Amino acid sequence: MSTIMQKIKEIEDEMARTQKNKATAHHLGLLKAKLAKLRRDLLAPPTKGGGGAGEGFDVTKSGDSRVGLVGFPSVGKSTLLNKLTGTFSEVASYEFTTLTCIPGVITYRGAKIQLLDLPGIIEGAKDGKGRGRQVISTARTCNCILIVLDAIKPITHKRLIEKELEGFGIRLNKEPPNLTFRKKDKGGINLTSTVTSTHLDLDTVKAICSEYRIHNADITLRYDATADDLIDVIEGSRIYMPCIYAVNKIDQITLEELEILDKLPHYCPISAHLEWNLDGLLDKIWEYLDLTRIYTKPKAMNPDYDDPVILSSKKRTVEDFCIRIHKDMLKQFKYALVWGSSAKHKPQRVGREHELEDEDVVQIVKKI
C-alpha cells in the first residue's frame, strides 16, 4: 500500500511540475492513465489476509434509496442524522467523534431513505490516509451524496472533498462522457470526432490506450472530451451520482456571507442544531433522488395510498413495478390497469412495457 501511495505522490508531483500546453498533452494523458490505475489498485478489496473493510463499515442496504453524509470532521453530520432520523450518533466538539458508519432511516413522502453518517473525511483519503478507503468505498454504494460543509470554515473544504471523491471514481452532478469506446481484434487505434477536439489527439489517445495495453480500438468523440473523460470510459468503474452541498451552521454567519454562499450550485443552507431549513433539505434530497411513487390497487378495493411502491425514475415500467413487489409476479402477469398521468384514459389497460409516472395507481390482472 505504501509503495502505491509513493508512486501516486511521485506522479502527482510530476504532473504539478509539468506545464499544461499542446506539447505536453501526450505526456500528461499518460500520467493521468497511470494515476487512475494506481487509484484503482488502492480501491481494490484487500486479500483474505488483509482483513475486511473495517468494523462498522459493512452496512446492509435497506429502504428504497441510500444517501451518504460526507464531510470533514465536526461539521455537524452526526447532529443532522440525529435530527432527521432520530438515530443516535455521538456528537462532541472535538474532531473524529464518529469512527464507524452510523445508519438511520427517514420516511419521506412514503419512501424509506437510508441515511449514512460516514466518519469525517480528511485530506488524502483517496490515497489511503485515515479510514478514507472505507469511507469512500461506502460512499460509492449510495444513490446520492450529501456533502456537509461548515459555513464558518473556508469553502475550500468543498473543493478538497470533491477532489477526494473524484480520486476514487465518484463523479458528482455529472453525466457519463458522451463518447464511444469499442475494442477490436485488429486495425490499430482509430479516432473519429463529430466536433473540433482541443484536448485529445491521436497520439494522446494512443498513449492512454497503450498504458492499458489496448492496441486496437475505435473511439468516437461526440463532444470536446478530455483525457480524464477517455480514462473514465476505459476504466468503466466510475459512478455518476447527484450531490447536494448542505452548508451547516448558517446561524453563525452574517446575511452578506449567506448571500455569497447562496451562489453555489446544488446548495442548501441549514442549521442542524437549530433545525433551520431541514424541510428544504428533505425536499432537495427527494428532488435529487428522482424517485417515482406508485400506488397499488387490489381488485374491487380502494388504492393503498399509505404504502407506495418506490421506483427509480430510470426504471419505472410496469415490469419494474412487478419485480419490485415480487420476482414471481411476472409469471402470472396478464395485463395492468393504470390510473394517473401516464394513462391516456382512466383506467388504461397496458402491458409490461408501459412507463409509469409519479403517483400513478396500478392494478395487476393475473392469468387465470
Image: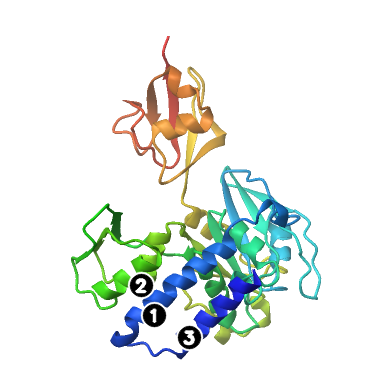
Q: Which residue is mark 3?
A: 14
Above or below: residue 334 compared with residue 252: above
Measure the alpha-carbon separation of dots 1 and 2: 9 Å
Left of 230 or right of it: where is 221? left
Q: What's the residue at 48%, 85% (across, down)? A: 14
Where the C terminus falls, by quadrant?
A: top left
The residue drawn where x is 64% and y is 83% is: 153
Element under label 3?
helix
Q: What residue did someone put label 2 on?
A: 227
Question: Considering only vertical position in the picture, is 352 above or below 184?
Answer: above
Disc 3 and disc 1: Cα gap in Å? 9 Å
Labelled disc at residue 28: 1
Sequence-wise, which precedes: disc 1 or disc 2?
A: 1
Question: Does the image show residue 279?
Answer: no
Q: Are marks 1 and 2 in contact (CB under 8 Å)?
A: yes
Task: Characterize the local packing of mark 3: few (<14), some (14-19) or many (20 or more) Cα atoms within 10 angstroms.
Answer: few
Tell me which amino acid carries mark 3: Glu
Instruction: Describe residue 247's horizontal placement relative to residue 37 as left or right.
Output: right
Q: Amino acid at mark 1?
A: Leu
